[in-house]
Image (spheres, rainbow, N blue to C red):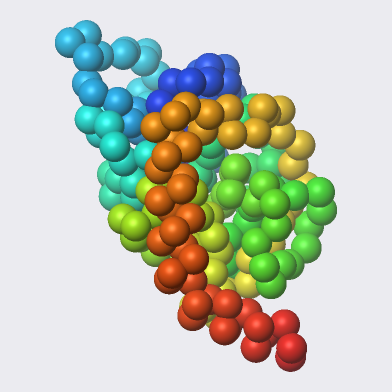
Amino acid sequence: MFTCIIPTIEKSDKWEKQIPFLVEHNKVDEIIIIKDLPKPEISAYYEFDKIKLFYTGGGCFCNGSWNKGVELAKNAENIILANDDILFNTDVIDRVCKLKLEEYGIIGVGNEFRNHISRPFGFGQLMFMKKENYTKIPKGIKHWYGDDWLFYQMSLLGKTNYTIDCKLITDVSESSGSEIVQERIKKDTEWWELNNEPFKQFFWKEWKN
């Protein structure tokens, strides 16, 4: 069974359109929506028992919201990390369920089922993994590079990351266009450039082998 974690700043409405399909899926027993916003006087209400809603107060961005969502998923064995600006056919969950997830690192989205040494483009828009393998993302990267961090940490644990064929309907980075998010991305890039050397050394060695 999966817990699906969706962080949002409500710049896109695609996640709300995706929710009913996740609710109906028999392999998804919990959906955690992390709204990176101040809690309003009248909180949003969802009629589905599967849904849990949490307001961060703002400032967590995507990666901090992923961390919070995993923390809240106390009983989860497997997790799905989904962007809020994507729509996808939930049959991909059925296909992932046919795999022995404990034998893989992260399964992200791509054009085919195959393993990867370095993170491919678009990988982090939708990711499947064992919860026990999730490694908390550092506070230095709040919006970008979270999927890089998880990808490379998983590889350092000796796990192989894969993509699975899954077509997404998305306006890429629809929720990342605001000025405050763009400013955060600049800071994330500075942190990543200063701190990703262990990953680069590891993967240069792996690539040569």
Residue 8 can be seen, yes or no: no
Residue at screen point 75% across, 49% down: 110
The answer to whether residue 32 is left or right of residue 157 is: left
The residue sitting at the left extreme is 41
Query: Residue farthest to the right?
Result: 112
Placement of 118 over or under 123, stated as above or below: below
**Tally of numbered tags:** 0
Instruction: Work out which quarter of the rendered image holds the C terminus and state it.
Output: bottom right
Foreground pick, 146 / 131: 146
Residue 156 location in percent, x, y?
A: 51, 78
Question: Is the residue 60 above or below the residue 119 in the image?
Answer: above
Question: Is residue 12 something one can see in this rendering?
Answer: yes
Instruction: Give the residue drawn at x 39%, y 19%.
Output: 48
Against 153, residue 48 (above or below) is above
Q: Foreground residue, 20 or 39?
A: 39
User: Which residue does the image show at 59% across and 49% down from the upper left?
Assistant: 124
Q: Left or right: 135 with respect to 205?
A: left
Position of 127 relative to 11 (above/below): below
Query: Which percent across, then down, holds residue 64?
Result: 34, 46
Q: Position of residue 174 (x, y in %)?
A: 58, 27
Can you give x and y, in whole percent of width and height, for residue 75 in the image? Answer: 32, 49
| Residue 174 appears left or right of 6 | right
Q: Residue at x 44, y 21 (%)?
A: 10
